[in-house]
Structures are given as C-alpha cells and as structure tokens.
Amino acid sequence: MSLSRRTLLHGVGATVASLGLPHAALSAAPIVFGYTGVTDFASVFVAASEGFFRRRKLEVELRLIPLNPTIPAALQSGSLHIGGPTASVFLQAVNGGLDLVVVSGGAVTAKEITHAGLVARAGSGIHNAADCVGKKIGVPGLDAFLHITFRAWLTQHGVDHRRVQFVEAAFPLHADLLRGGSIDAVLTGEPVIGRIIDHNVGYVASYYLTFMPDNRPTVLHAAHRQWVQQNPEAMRAFREAVHEGAHFARQPQHDARVRAAMGQFLKIPPEVLARMPIVRPSASIDREQLAYWVDMMQEQKMLKTAPDIDRLIAK
C-alpha cells in the first residue's frame, strides 16, 4: 500500500474510532452501494433492475466509484454503506486497521471468461510478459485485483514486477491515456476493452487472468462491521437480493436482461454491450476463497500479519 493511502486509511480509522460513525450513515434505508465501472457487479445491477431489492423493501442507491482502493475508506467514514472492493483491497484495508466485513460475494474467476486483461497501445510492441519490462502500465487501483494478479502472472513468467512502472488510472480514462501515449498499456476489463478495440487505440496482449483457478472472488460486497451490527435485517435482505441476482444472471435465457442491467449502470454503447461476455457471478463467499488471496498477498509482502479470516465474513 502506498504511504498516502495507508495514511488516509489510518486517519479515517482514527477519526471513526474516536467519534463513532454518524447515526445517519448507519440507517437501513436508503443503502448506498459503491461500485466501479466493470461487469463484475452484474448481480447487484440485476438485483436493482429486476426489483429484487424492492421486493425486500430495500431502497438501494448505486453509486459509481472511479477507483476501487477508495471504497474501504468510504465504508469506514459512512459515505457508503456497502461497497465492492476487490479482495486484495479489502484485505489490505483490514490489515491496516479498518473494521470491515464481507456481506456477500460478487463475481468469481472462470477460465472460460475473458473479460479482462492486459491491453496494449497500438505500436507499443507488448505481446508477452517479458515485453512489459521498462513499460508504463495503467491500473485501475494500485494493489487492487488486476494489479496484484498481474504481478503474480509476471512472476510466473520469470519477470520481476519491480521492473515495470505501474500508475493508477480510473477505468474511464484508459482509452484516452493509451491514445495520448502517456502509458504503454492498461490492465482493464469490459466494457473498456471493447471501446479501446473499436476505436483502434489498442489490442489485447494477454487475457492473463486465465492463469488463476476457478471460483476465486474478483470483487466482494463489504460493509463496516458496526453498520452490519446495527442493521442485521437490512444486511441479510441485501445478501438475499444479491444471491437472487447472481442466480438470475447465471441463467443463459436471461442474457438479454442481464446485458440491459449492465448497460443501465455502466452506460455501455449497444454495439459493445451486444458482444460483451457476461460474468457469471456467485454471491457465496467462504474461507477458502479469502485464504487464496491472503496467500497471494503474503507472497508479495502486502500484509503485515495474517488476518483472522473467520471474523471477516458477516454471519
């Protein structure tokens, strides 16, 4: 974690610990949910568009967050009630002292799904791991999912990730940064990949995530522990709605409606939306899934201590 982000998280934690979360931020309705601009939140998009939240008398406001690593601090401060950090961002925030728990799972890895990868600028000459040495690569969150998995992929191919320069860049900026030549490649996902290719700005150098085992969480739905304790019924209702959304999204006969839900919240052009792969979400989360990320992060020396995983999943 960078010094600035660590300082921010500890500062927010100290403020909350001394003052307590504001009561308004802990109310059950409306629930403010923070997501980033990727398809991994399909189960939440579907739950909102198909009325699964309303059926449970929940009012949920979906709020787009530009950078994933800012979500934990927003949960701690109360500006978000539930949010979708990647597993690595969540675990590092907890390791830094934030009292967060997982409410439900989001999307999971699957080798047949190629919705994210290394996208290189046209003319960059990047085609494999070795070509990344000395290059500047944009990531939608330092130490977030795409970043740490890419470092693991580089290591697997014998490349020292410290020889690659990583810069933080929000998803909506990826195409423009490549077009302008200020970076050589980005780690990105759909719908951004489709837009980059459609405008001949870049190409997919590698769908590198296929090196990962199946059923590992890409994003989590997390909340502050105090919010969960004060709103257990709302938390359980949210979890049930997301489970229903995930089940709905896994049925091929619902593909058109799932795409429509993603288009509504991600503002995807129809021509990109039509050919975009659908991430099959799984709202379940267990100890083994989190332990996978703990192991990877410890290998990269990202955690000071091993977390108590059993305390991190809301009951």
Image (cartoon, rainbow, N blue to C red):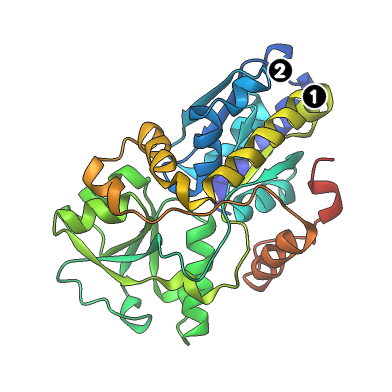
105 or 294: which is nearer to us? 105
Circle number at residue 233: 1
Circle number at residue 28: 2
Vertical arrangement, residue 271 with respect to residue 56, above or below: below
Which residue is outermost to the front?
253
Vertical arrangement, residue 135 with respect to residue 57, above or below: below
Is residue 168 visible from the viewing direction of this image?
yes
Which residue is outermost to the top?
24
Q: What's the residue type where badge 2 is placed?
A: Ala
**In the picture, which quadrant includes the N terminus?**
bottom right
Residue 224, percent across and down? 73, 33
Residue 271, percent across and down? 22, 46
Graded by Cα atoms within 10 Å as few (under 14), some (14 to 19) or many (20 or more), the crowding at tag 2 reads many
The residue positioned 42% from the left and 51% from the top of the image is 140
Quadrant in which residue 47 is drawn: top right
Q: What's the residue type where badge 1 is placed?
A: Glu
Task: Return the disc, 2 or 1, that comes first in the chain's sequence.
Answer: 2
Does 150 sit left or right of 54 as displayed? left
The residue positioned 75% from the left and 43% from the top of the image is 97
Residue 183, percent across and down? 26, 60
- Mark 2 secondary-structure assignment: loop
Q: How far apart are marks 2 and 1 (CA)?
A: 8 Å
